[in-house]
Amino acid sequence: MATRKRITVADFLAMKKRGEKISMLTAYDFRTAKLLDQAGVEGILVGDSMAMVVQGHTTTVPVTLDQLIYHGEMVVRGVERSLVVVDLPFPINHLALAELVDRAGRLLKETGCQAVKMEGGAKQAECIEAMVTAGIPVVAHVGLRPQSINLVGRYRVHRDRDVLLTDARAAQQAGAFAVVVECVPADIAAHLSADLEIPTIGIGAGAGCDGQILVTDDLLGLTTGYVPSFVKQYADLQTTMTDAVQKYCGDVRSGEFPGPDQTFT
């Protein structure tokens, strides 16, 4: 079977020009990445949300570069078509430019991904430009920035149109090929999308963005605990898995498993 055509940075930009919506989801392992890729998503993000989804932390701050490289390499092995982006963890986007480029370069070289994502806009424009100049494609991230939770104190909707527009324009000018727009009123996000030449990828930012991204565990109903209001749950795999395990435990206790079909003679 022929390998499917790999989606590239140029394809993201071309989709924006053609008015085609971009679908993205998160993955942290080979199996999930392979399923998402086969299902047809255009982009897969190995997000620092791993800290909460996989590691059980309450914020994204604890995840490390080495952990993202480890999981990113697994994800890339499972993908034939989707564009794979890996997050730059806190506080890499606040390091000196040479250190930043070095660490971003490690993500590309050691995982095989095609791009990195960095929280920030205008204040991080110099960082974005340094990475792009070095040949590292960058997705910017404006609006809610989870890595800054200890500074802002809580997750909230960002409504300052001028700040958001300044951030998004600065990221584009610095060379970012896309920008994630998180927790922003729909009308403002739509305005950003119309203003920019690069695609906007919304999460809690309405239908006016050029694409959408969700945490896969939220979409599949696997999240234990708080699920953001902007999430649409397409399945309830937590209940499915719990029911299956409970049935297995019952069969083991009753002696029904293993039965004749699961036994060698």
Image (cartoon, rainbow, N blue to C red):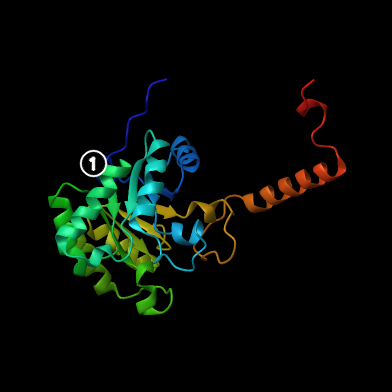
Q: Nearer the viewer, residue 242 or 251?
A: 251
Report the residue at 33% width, 56% height from top: 65
| Res. 22 in view | no
Q: Say what secondary structure mark 1 lies in.
A: helix
Left or right: 163 as drawn, with respect to 181: left
Report the residue at 43% width, 63% height from top: 204
Q: Where is residue 49 in the image (x, y as percent from the top left)?
A: 43, 59
Quarter placement of the C terminus: top right
Q: In this view, does 7 lie above or below 126?
A: above
Quarter placement of the N terminus: top left
Q: Position of residue 138 (x, y in %)?
A: 24, 53
Instruction: Look at mark 1 in the image and give the residue it sits on.
Output: 10
Q: Position of residue 162 (x, y in %)?
A: 24, 74
- Residue at the right extreme? 254
Which three-letter amino acid code belongs to the residue tagged 1?
Ala
Report the residue at 43% width, 73% height from top: 155
